Amino acid sequence: MAGTTDISLIPGITIAGASPELTHYTPAADVEYLLTGRPRSIPGIPVTPDGIPTPAVVTRALTRDVPKLVAFAGGRVRPRVPYIDLGGEPGGDFRRGPALSESTVENILENGRTLGRELAKAGDVFIGESIPGGTTTAMAILVALGYDAWGKTSSASPNNPRGLKAAVVREGLARAGRLDDPVKALAEVGDPVHVGVAAIALGVLDAGGAPVLAGGTQMLAVAAIIKSLGGDLGKVAVATTGWIVDDRSADFLGLAREIGVTNIKVTRTSFSSSRFPGLRYYDRGYVKEGVAMGGALYIASLRGLPVLELVEREYEELVRP
């Protein structure tokens, strides 16, 4: 699932792009690379300001033979690969006004739910995301839905800007006022991607399936949305990385307990012995999740794949002159 929020333009809020302005290109480039091995919206793969590569490298390396479909929930830059459009819009800066219109939220929910029902007919459905700034909107969604998520969502940086995130969320919630209805809460302080992922998962549940939310603390916000809209969390799994669970600047397991997420798949992977510095940074607290990396690592563990070997082979193709 790809999309953007203008929250990512706030300086210091995310490192999911070489600059705040480039974060609007990151989701499109992620899914372009994931499907074709080459980004089309920007010259190279998305990187942090320090040059650390997108987790799409890991996901592509481990799921080359797994069917993938791109859904676009709404963003400033549309992917240059085939995708299913959920009829959304880019997420706005919720400090200044509603992030989305309520009609857009309802449209994404309807279209995503329809897609989820169809996808469930094909077998297991893993749903990932790419949305810079998403851990901040995840915090806002969780708090708006009644959970104590202050400072508990993770970050792509080892220096989680929890204070900045909380200040942004407080400003947005103060502007929005009372939020008694989940659709209104999502419109006021959400983003299109969280809505879209939840909608697809609800569709899978409608069809009798058991969706796997492949991601970190953002997927707990998705689980909260599913619960608020009547979905059965007992049939929902979250597949994430050890880097997320071990992140002391967040509280993945505590949030999961509060929301009622019990089926958690955690993969323990280390790139500390990699010959590539960009991959070794993952073990220093950078990136941690995104683009369904937790789901890809979980699939790899079930299949007994040589994770580091495959990821290094993929990364070597990228850095080769």
Image (cartoon, rainbow, N blue to C red):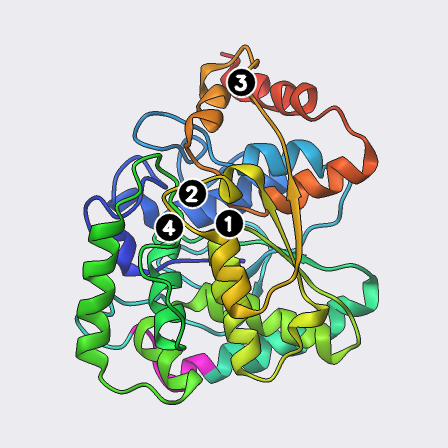
CB-based contact (under 8 Å), mark 2 and mark 1: yes
* Left/right of residue 229 with respect to residue 88 in the rendered view: right
What x and y, as percent, mark residue 27? 45, 49
Residue 316, picture quadrant: top right
Amino acid type of the residue tagged 3 in the rendering: Ser
Looking at the image, is mark 1 or mark 3 nearer the viewer? Answer: 3
Q: Tell me the distance, in whole angstroms, between the alpha carbons under discs 4 and 2.
A: 16 Å
Residue 240 versus residue 19: which sits nearer the camera? Answer: 240
Which residue is under mark 1?
80
Q: Which residue is mark 4?
A: 132
Task: Give the residue at x 48% y 57%.
Answer: 254
Give the label on residue 272, or none. Answer: 3
**Amino acid bearing label 1:** Arg
Q: Tell me whether the residue at label 3 lies in contact with that at label 2, contact meaning CB atoms closer than 8 angstroms.
A: no
How packed is label 3: few (under 14 Cα within 10 Å), some, or many (20 or more)? some
- Residue stretch in magenta: 99-105
Vertical side of 296 occupied by 193: above or below: below
Q: Nearer the viewer, residue 252 or 65?
A: 252
Which residue lies at the image location 53% right of the left edge and 22% below the top edge?
Answer: 318
Between tags 3 and 4, which lies in front? 3
Amino acid type at image mark 2: Ser
Image quadrant of residue 297?
Answer: top right
